[in-house]
Amino acid sequence: MAFMNFWNSSSLYGSNNGSTNLYSLFSERNAIKNGTYKRLLKSYYSSLEENSGSTTSTSRRRGSNNIIDTLLREKMYPTVSKETEKANSDLTSGISSLKSSVSTLQSEKTYEDTENGSTAAEKVVSAMKSYVNNYNNVVTASKSSTLSNKTAYVANMMSTTSKFEKELKEIGVMLKNDGTLQLDETKLKGADLSKVQKLFSTDNIQSYGSTIASRIKFAGSNTTTTSTTNNNTSTDTKKPTSTSAAALKKDGEALASNELYAKVKDEDGNETDEYDVKKILSTAKSFVSNYNAMFDKAESSSNSGVLSNLSYIRERTANSTKALKELGFSVDKKGRLSLDEDTFKKADMSKVHDFFKNYGSYVASNASRVDYYMNTNANATSGYTSKASYNIPSVSGYNSFI
């Protein structure tokens, strides 16, 4: 039908622009909610009857109303097809298999020759074949799945793979246009196995394997599904508090500000060369506490906006490990911060200020986005491309907003 084609082409499916998609998404929801959508349908069917030159009978009006009610019901309460149910099942089982594949590639034993058995190269190739196969199954299933609390992590996983595309290609793993992977066994067999092991290192929280393992962990731990069957809707209502993210934003801004580093004044009101170290230390301790609390709570989120900004912060922190250490901060394997107060007190506060002008501002900016995404239902969890660029969820998610 022309009208339905127009509706679909001008809605969230019709543009790659994020803001346009978001606007269209809420426009459609509002249209359904306030009755505009139904009035548009009525107007459309009335115009069809007028254009056909036919007289409007009671039976014709009833027929039109039945069609309108059916379309509206399908728009608000889309059913889950058998294909979708299968995709949901395949995604759940696929995530479990993928987790096992990653663990094998992270194990040191995989990179050791087995006495009177397989060589390390043969074991790595076998493990990588399993990984690529399970990865592809998960990606394929996620594109038809309605389990948004899982597909968000898959989208983030795909984004990570895109980020490591060059390194993966060097060992014979290519990223295809549809988001799946392709393995060149010959190239992998001739590759330096230390490169493979480094990619999947458990010692580096920023490694490809560690990041993928993290996404799979949370995707697999989510047991509450988001699916719609007829008029019944089950949604994941567990939302982590955003207090720590908002507090971290304030701490980051404070540590980046000039006010915190104002020199102490003497009894006569004259400025000295001394900093209020106690005040700066208190803010730094609060920063560490809220930083760790935010990650503890937000890492289990299924919102891709939350996950992306956590990833940005984590990467910036990992790249700043050396500078942080000089000021008394240390980063553990999980990416959490700790502060040696004695080292911090002895540090040059002007250097602390210079460092946090950039680092503190960056963390504050992304923490602000974490706070925002944790307080919005605009979850970009479906419609991702091979590079895991996101579209807003399809109309199957409407029911949780109405």
Image (cartoon, grey):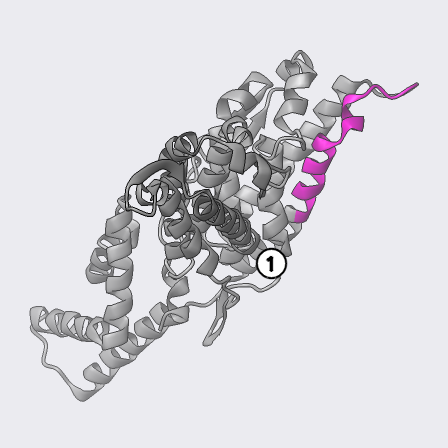
Q: Pointer 1: what residue?
A: 222
In this image, 19 relative to 154: left or right?
left
Q: Is residue 357 magenta?
A: no
In this image, 63 relative to 381: left or right?
left
Q: Is residue 339 above or below residue 187?
A: below
Residue at 26 percent across and 44 percent down: it is 17
Judged from this view, the residue extending furthest toward the top is: 190
Q: Nearer the viewer, residue 73 or 383?
A: 383
State which region is magenta: 96-115
Q: Judge whether residue 38 can be spotted in this image.
A: yes
Q: Is residue 106 magenta?
A: yes
Horizontal and vertical percent position of residue 43: 14, 73
The residue under label 1 is which amino acid type? Asn
Residue at 50 percent across and 35 percent down: it is 317
Q: Is residue 280 above or below residue 59?
A: above
Q: Is residue 171 above or below residue 262?
A: above
- Quadrant where the C terminus sits is bottom left
